[in-house]
């Protein structure tokens, strides 16, 4: 029997498992796929530490970027951490003052570039298709390398990884005692759900409700290419966050438990990032479908993504690549759900990270310390129970 079972081996699950094991607990990490399939396999890997707008997110962002800068050395393996430019492109008819106002509360103010200056920073940009760009200092990791590095370090500390599908939680008298998988039952003193977009469905299968949601994200991934993308590019007026905010109020929450619902039309963001091995991931289509296993029309999706990206980054949009999709978890206030679930003291959520590269490393370390008995006001603020009134 282990002290902790962690469900989900993506960036959040492996980060938490490593920190718990390092803190002295015995940890069993259960992951369904030996090759990553979720958002940790398809995410851009950007670390938007500049975007904090409150005292809480500023503190976590400062801790997060500091942690990312030291992890390669600590883990003994390169996470491909690097500093790079982020260019948030403006539509040709956008009012720069209006767009700047949307970022006025960020901890690091952007530099407004005209179309020519943006093109000088990133020559692949189509000057005639943008009204300029906001320049931010940014950072980036390879999510796959992050996970592999943590996995090796976790195992070297004595942690165990089991590849199995978790079917449900083992609940007895309002206490979670372990998990049932397709490879048998496993018991533990505590269980942490880090299953990203599948977290809601997993909890529901055990009769447990949590206000965690997900979008279906779709993008195109290339093989290594000769083309060089210098910066990470995203639209300044991203539709994804509007989509998330519009689907998580109290009145809509029950709709998430009705399979087959599409709560809003999809959105597309024309973005791109190139990794150190020269692969490029571009575009992100986001769909709000209540069925985590819903299937999209990949041919049409790929065509739509290419059309959007080609306007801003023509040479990127025409690259050969593979359409891929995953689930992206989020909460209704853009902060992660971290801590015990109401009514189940041994069950914990560590999911809903809109910005996992920023928050997960810092909160994993905090949570592990909290689990040893140390008080942490930030963990309390991020409790999954914050949306419920007594």
Image (cartoon, rainbow, N blue to C red):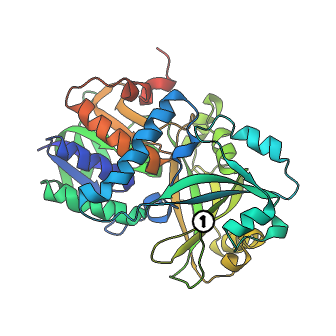
Q: Tell me: residue 96, above or below residue 367.
A: below
The image quadrant that residue 363 belongs to is top left
Q: Nearer the viewer, residue 180 or 9?
A: 9
Identity of the residue drawn at 75% across and 43% down: 100
Q: How many marks?
A: 1
Seen in the image, is 336 located left or right of residue 244?
left
The residue tagged 1 is 231
Query: Residue 293's x, y, as percent?
Result: 51, 59
Query: Residue 136's x, y, as percent?
Result: 62, 52
Seen in the image, is 302 located left or right of residue 346?
right
Say which element carries label 1: loop
Identity of the residue drawn at 61% across and 36% down: 248
The image quadrant that residue 375 belongs to is top left
Seen in the image, is 323 located left or right of residue 71?
right
Q: Tell me: residue 306, above or below residue 332.
A: below
Residue 285 visible in the shown view? yes
Q: Nearer the viewer, residue 346 or 339?
A: 339
Query: Residue 143's x, y, as percent?
Result: 41, 62
Q: Tell me: residue 330, above or below residue 146.
A: above
Query: Residue 347's x, y, as percent?
Result: 30, 34
Identity of the residue drawn at 50% across and 39% down: 212
Residue at the far right in the pictured view: 93
The image quadrant that residue 158 belongs to is bottom left
Residue 150 visible in the shown view? no
Q: Nearer the viewer, residue 361 or 335?
A: 361
Seen in the image, is 12 located left or right of residue 270?
left
Q: Quadrant of the N terminus?
A: top left
Identity of the residue drawn at 37% across and 56% down: 10
């Amino acid at each position: 029997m282990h002290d902790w079972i962690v469900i989900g081996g993506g960036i959040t699950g492996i980060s938490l498992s490593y920190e718990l094991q390092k803190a002295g607990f015995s940890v069993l990490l259960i992951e369904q796929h030996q090759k990553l399939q979720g958002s940790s396999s398809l995410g851009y890997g950007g670390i938007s530490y500049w975007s904090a707008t409150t005292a809480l997110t500023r503190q976590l962002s400062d801790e997060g970027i500091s942690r990312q800068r030291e992890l390669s050395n600590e883990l003994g393996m390169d996470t491909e951490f690097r500093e790079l430019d982020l260019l948030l492109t403006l539509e040709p008819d956008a009012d720069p003052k209006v767009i700047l106002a949307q970022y006025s509360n960020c901890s690091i103010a952007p530099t407004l570039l005209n179309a020519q200056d943006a093109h000088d920073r990133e020559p692949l940009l189509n000057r005639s298709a943008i009204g300029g760009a906001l320049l931010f200092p940014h950072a980036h990791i390879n999510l796959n390398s992050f996970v592999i590095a943590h996995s090796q370090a976790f195992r070297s500390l004595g942690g165990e990884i089991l590849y199995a599908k978790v079917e449900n939680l083992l609940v007895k008298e309002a206490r979670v005692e372990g998990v049932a998988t397709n490879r048998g039952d496993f018991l533990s003193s505590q269980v942490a759900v880090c299953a990203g977009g599948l977290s809601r469905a997993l909890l529901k299968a055990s009769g447990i409700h949590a206000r965690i949601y997900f979008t279906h994200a779709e993008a195109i991934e290339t093989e290594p290419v000769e083309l060089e993308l210098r910066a990470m590019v995203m639209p300044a007026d991203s539709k994804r966050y509007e989509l998330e905010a519009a689907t998580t109020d109290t009145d809509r929450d029950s709709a998430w438990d009705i399979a087959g619902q599409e709560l809003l039309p999809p959105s597309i963001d024309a973005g791109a990032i190139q990794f150190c091995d020269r692969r490029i991931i571009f575009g992100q289509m986001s769909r709000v479908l209540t069925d985590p296993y819903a299937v999209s029309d990949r041919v049409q999706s790929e065509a739509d993504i290419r059309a959007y990206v080609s306007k801003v980054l023509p040479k990127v949009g025409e690259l050969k690549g593979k359409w891929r999709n995953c689930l992206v978890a989020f909460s209704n206030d853009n902060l992660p759900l971290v801590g015990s679930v109401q009514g189940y003291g041994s069950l914990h959520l560590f999911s809903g990270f809109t910005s996992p590269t920023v928050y997960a490393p810092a909160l994993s370390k905090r949570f592990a310390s909290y689990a040893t008995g140390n008080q942490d006001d930030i963990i309390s603020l991020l409790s999954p129970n914050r949306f419920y009134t007594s």
